[in-house]
């Protein structure tokens, strides 16, 4: 494997804060929420990695479970942003080891679609809406809008009025294609200057990865699968995981194997009433870990694993975005 300074990458440790309405709309299923959040990061990561060398690593999911005690319930985006920042002061972020805390909800936020601190940890984004999630993360990693007047030479994109008023009175190019940090349509990538700012921010603020990841370690609990997936603790600095599921603990009778970009293993091909053994290794551009100690997976006899979950994201793999959405910024 090639190992050079320019091929290092940066890990953003992210926590996700879910409101009770989202929890209830997913049948009060915490594991399902966790898994859907992982899938969101799985889809966001290729864009962040390609353009800015950043990989999101989900280290914490907090779920509000009751409407009555949910501080976000009934609040619009501005108030949720304020609550998020007071619920997550710097000391709490530090204690959990978080670089970014993202609030996600199925509820619309009123007049805004999302909100983020520029070069700061707070992020309010709509559930399962990739364009806005990538946009708000771009703010967290310090990029202003592409139509902002602060760029050297002025706004980078001119389909909307400039932010700051430096181009007031000039003609708007409404058909101009734009990038993730702007409001023009066609946002399939970060603008090179946004990406450069984000990469610089990562260098100064995020953990740099320059060696292979460690070996995955399972939690102690036995896996009696009632879900079509299994979530294991993420390994810091991984870019992908390889897994094998075998009928024997020596992995001579392989049942299924594969590769997953995030720390969740599909189990939907396993049969009820049988024991299997699962092992995982973590990998990144610098190399692979050893295989984990095998973990026994039991599908209770008579259990019917639920079917594979329907795809939430219709734009997966297509690299096509929805139309640009408005938002509002807070400068810390
Ligand atoms: Zn914005």
Image (cartoon, grey):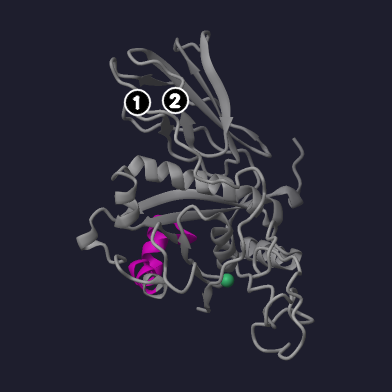
SS for dot 1 = loop
Q: How many marks?
A: 2
Where does ligand 1 appear, by image quarter? bottom right
Judge whether residue 326 is colored magenta: no
Query: Would residue 134 be found to the left or right of residue 168 on screen?
Result: left
Quadrant where the image shows the N terminus: top right
Answer with left or right where residue 257 lies relative to residue 175: left
Give how far across and how far down residue 266 sits, in percent. 47, 29
Residue 252: image location, x then y, percent: 53, 8
Mark 1 neighbour class, 10 Å CA radius: few under 14, some 14 to 19, many 20 or more: some
Which of 261 and 23 lies nearest the eye of the viewer?
23
Q: Position of residue 181 (x, y in %)?
A: 64, 67
- Name the quadrant containing residue 268: top left
Q: Position of residue 248 (x, y in %)?
A: 45, 10
For the residues labelled 2 and 1, the Cα–Cα distance comes to 8 Å
Main SS, magenta region, reads helix
Q: Residue extending furthest left?
A: 68
**Disc number placed over residue 242 in the picture, else none:** none
**Disc nearer the start of the sequence (2/1):** 1
Q: Which residue is mark 1?
A: 225
**Is mark 2 in CB contact (under 8 Å) with mark 1?**
yes
| Badge 2 element | loop
The part of the chain drawn in magenta is 82-101
Residue beneath the point at 34% across and 19% down = 299
Residue beneath disc 2: 267
| Residue 95 lies within the magenta run | yes
């Amino acid at each position: 494997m090639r190992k050079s300074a320019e091929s290092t990458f940066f890990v953003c440790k992210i926590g996700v804060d879910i409101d009770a309405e989202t929890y209830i709309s997913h049948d009060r299923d915490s594991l399902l929420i966790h898994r859907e959040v992982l899938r969101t990061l799985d889809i966001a990561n290729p864009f962040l990695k390609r353009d800015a060398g950043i990989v999101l690593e989900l280290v914490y999911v907090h779920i509000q479970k009751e409407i009555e005690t949910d501080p976000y319930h009934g609040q619009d985006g501005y108030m949720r942003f304020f609550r998020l920042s007071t619920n997550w002061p710097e000391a709490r972020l530090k204690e959990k080891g978080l670089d970014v805390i993202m609030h996600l909800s199925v509820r619309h936020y009123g007049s805004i679609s999302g909100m983020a601190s520029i070069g700061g940890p707070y992020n309010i984004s709509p559930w399962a809406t990739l364009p806005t999630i990538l946009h708000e993360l771009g703010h967290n990693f310090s990029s202003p809008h592409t139509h902002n007047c602060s760029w050297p030479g002025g706004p980078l994109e001119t389909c909307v009025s400039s932010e700051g008023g430096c181009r007031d009175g000039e003609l708007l190019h409404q058909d101009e294609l734009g990038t993730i940090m702007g409001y023009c349509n066609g946002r399939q990538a970060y603008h090179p200057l946004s990406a450069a700012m984000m990469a610089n921010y990562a260098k100064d603020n995020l953990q740099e990865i320059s060696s292979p990841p460690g070996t995955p370690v399972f939690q102690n609990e036995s896996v009696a699968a009632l879900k079509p997936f299994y979530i294991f603790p993420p390994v810091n600095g991984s870019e992908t995981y390889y897994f094998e599921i075998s009928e024997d603990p020596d992995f001579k009778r392989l049942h299924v194997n594969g590769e997953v970009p995030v720390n969740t293993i599909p189990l939907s091909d396993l049969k009820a009433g049988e024991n299997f053994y699962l092992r995982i290794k973590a990998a990144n551009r610098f190399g692979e870990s050893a295989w984990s100690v095998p973990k026994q997976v039991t599908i209770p006899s008579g259990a019917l694993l639920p079917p594979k979950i329907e795809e939430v994201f219709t734009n997966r793999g297509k690299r096509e975005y929805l139309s640009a959405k408005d938002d509002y910024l807070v400068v810390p």
